């Protein structure tokens, strides 16, 4: 019990080396980069028009952009919108 503080200090010196300190500081930075980075990149890209094709067997589904039934009974429609309008 007399030397427990000396043993604890020796263990801490053994644990705290350069690679441990580097990983201790680098891990939160990498986590922040991977969580915030995609959102920032998504905001930098301008919104583009997306053409969405819908194939349905429901006769009551009338989307803007026209369409109509083909020979097999499928309702074919195309919608042009931005990503924010589709959400």
Image: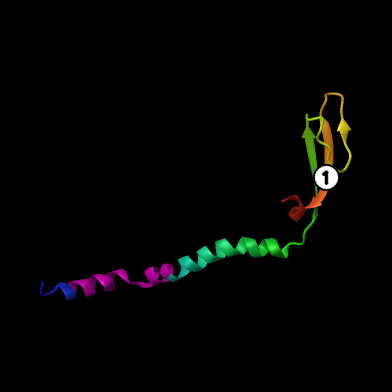
User: Which residue is denoted by mark 1 in the rendering?
Assistant: 79
Q: How far across and how far down the image is residue 74, in percent?
A: 81, 29
Quarter of the image with the N terminus is bottom left
* Above or below for 76 versus 25: above
Residue lying furthest top in this view?
72
Classify residue 48 by image quadrant: bottom right
Seen from the viewer's position, the closer of residues 81 and 32 is 81
* Above or below for 45 versus 56: below
Decide if residue 39 is on the left or right side of residue 58.
left
The residue under the point 27% across, 72% down is: 12
The residue under the point 84% across, 37% down is: 62
Classify residue 19 by image quadrant: bottom left
The residue under the point 83% across, 25% down is: 73
* Mark 1 residue crowding within 10 angstroms, few (<14) / some (14–19) / many (20+): some
Q: Which residues are magenta?
A: 7-24
Secondary structure category for the residue under label 1: strand
Q: How far across and how far down the image is residue 59, in percent?
A: 82, 30
Q: How far across and how far down the image is residue 13, in percent?
A: 27, 73
Q: Was residue 61 drawn as part of the magenta stretch in this picture?
A: no
Decide if residue 40 is on the left or right side of residue 84.
left
Q: How far across and how far down the image is residue 21, in percent?
A: 39, 71
């Amino acid at each position: 019990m007399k030397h427990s503080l000396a043993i604890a200090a020796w263990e801490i010196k053994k644990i705290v080396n350069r690679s441990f300190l580097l990983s201790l500081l680098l891990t939160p930075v990498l986590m922040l980069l991977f969580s915030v980075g995609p959102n920032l990149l998504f905001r930098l890209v301008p919104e583009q028009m997306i053409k969405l094709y819908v194939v349905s067997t429901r006769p009551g589904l009338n989307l803007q952009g026209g369409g109509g039934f083909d020979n097999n009974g499928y309702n074919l429609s195309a919608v042009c919108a931005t990503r924010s309008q589709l959400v």
